């Protein structure tokens, strides 16, 4: 077995007293000694239990899983960083599957695909449908088709986690990390893992958090695909303008004396605004393309 001192196991926690001890023990038995727990303010003794099992425990700055992840990426100094939820749904025995593609330089970011081997009851029907919808939306918007963009079990090379520029504070962090990987042209793959039934009550509220994650995926388009993002907004203004304009023309054809002056002004404003937003999107896309070419040239020159 290869030395695992270059691997840091990162566990974000919030009230995981029921599972954190066994999870840390599993990783230690698997040969991983460097374990970092960043806790979001647990009130059930999670921090004390984790420290008692020999993990390094740090109190999280701010609230939300995203804040813990961002903090871990800033603190990490290992060649490989493994991120795993602390709720006991993931197996330490699967960690080598995530690590191997990074060691062999096949990937910079490895996602544990939960849908290849999950226990009965690990997902509700709503969770399964919601995940499939979000995965498909992500694929359509970003052009990279993955099966589990919301997985909480991942591995990163130093090149990957040190280059991420993250903004999300909550559960949308997984989607943002995936989008960041695509933006930075890093290699990303998925590997099958086992997903167990959670011990205790889930913190995820499927409908509310699903909507938030979906909005996060769309919001990230501003920096990753600005033409698509601004194009949708511009198209909405255009449609409103064209609809109101069609109404003005229809009314004028029926009754020529009815001018609808204010509605005509509104129509003009909507159409002009829509066109300007679309043009802004085109310019933003060109700037992003130029930036990628410049960064690619710099990277090629260094190599």
Image: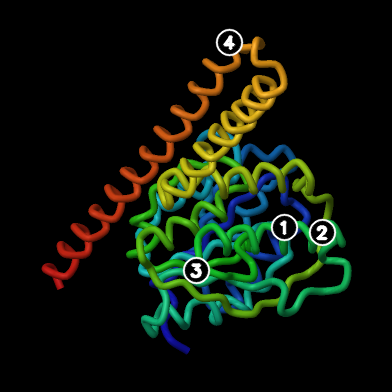
Locate residue 231 relative to residue 12 in the image: left or right.
left
- Label 4 crowd bin: few (<14), some (14–19), many (20+), radius 10 Å: few
Residue designated by label 2: 199
Locate residue 19 relative to residue 257 in the image: left or right.
right
> Alpha-carbon distance for marks 1 and 4?
58 Å
Picture coordinates of residue 292, whole percent (x, y)? 27, 58
**Are the residues tagged 4 and 3 within 8 Å (C-beta)?**
no
**Are the residues tagged 1 and 3 within 8 Å (C-beta)?**
no
Locate residue 152 relative to residue 279 in the image: left or right.
right
- Which disc is residue 87 wearing? 1
- Indicate the secondary structure of the residue bearing disc 2: loop
Residue designated by label 3: 155
Q: Earlier in the sequence, mark 1 or mark 4?
A: 1
Q: Give above or below for 47 relative to 161.
A: above
Whether residue 59 is visible, yes or no, is no
Residue designated by label 4: 262
At x 69% / y 21%, what residue is drawn? 251
**Are the residues tagged 1 and 2 within 8 Å (C-beta)?**
yes
- Indicate the secondary structure of the residue bearing disc 3: strand
- Label 2 crowd bin: few (<14), some (14–19), many (20+), radius 10 Å: few
Whether residue 282 is visible, yes or no, is yes
At x 60% / y 16%, what residue is drawn? 263
Picture coordinates of residue 21, whole percent (x, y)? 69, 60
- Label 1 crowd bin: few (<14), some (14–19), many (20+), radius 10 Å: many
> Alpha-carbon distance for marks 2 and 3?
23 Å
At x 65% / y 10%, what residue is drawn? 257
Q: Nearer the viewer, mark 2 or mark 4?
A: 4
> Alpha-carbon distance for marks 2 and 4?
61 Å
- Indicate the secondary structure of the residue bearing disc 4: helix
């Amino acid at each position: 077995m290869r030395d695992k001192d270059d691997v840091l196991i990162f566990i974000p926690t919030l009230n995981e007293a029921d599972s954190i001890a066994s999870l840390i023990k599993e990783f230690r038995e698997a040969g991983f000694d460097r374990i970092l727990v960043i806790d979001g303010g647990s009130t059930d003794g999670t921090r004390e239990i984790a420290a008692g099992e020999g993990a390094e425990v740090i109190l999280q700055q701010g609230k939300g899983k995203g804040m813990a992840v961002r903090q871990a990426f800033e603190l990490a100094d290992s060649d490989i960083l493994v991120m795993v939820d602390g709720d006991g749904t993931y197996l330490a025995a699967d960690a080598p599957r995530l690590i191997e593609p990074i060691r062999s330089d096949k990937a910079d970011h490895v996602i544990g695909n939960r849908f290849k081997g999950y226990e009965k009851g690990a997902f509700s029907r709503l969770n399964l449908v919601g995940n499939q919808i979000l995965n498909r939306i992500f694929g359509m918007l970003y052009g990279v088709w993955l099966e589990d963009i919301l997985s909480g079990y991942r591995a990163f090379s130093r090149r990957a986690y040190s280059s991420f520029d993250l903004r999300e504070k909550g559960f949308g962090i997984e989607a943002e990390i995936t989008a960041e990987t695509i933006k930075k042209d890093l290699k990303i793959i998925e590997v099958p893992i086992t997903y167990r039934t959670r011990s205790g009550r889930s913190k995820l509220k499927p409908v509310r958090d699903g909507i938030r994650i979906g909005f996060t995926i769309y919001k990230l388009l501003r920096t990753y695909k600005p033409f698509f993002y601004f194009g949708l907004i511009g198209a909405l203004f255009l449609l409103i303008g064209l609809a109101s304009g069609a109404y003005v023309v229809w009314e004028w054809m029926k009754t020529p004396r009815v001018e609808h002056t204010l509605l005509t002004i509104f129509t003009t404003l909507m159409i002009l605004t829509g066109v300007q937003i679309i043009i802004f999107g085109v310019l933003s896309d060109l700037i992003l393309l130029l930036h990628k070419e410049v960064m690619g040239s710099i990277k090629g020159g260094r190599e």
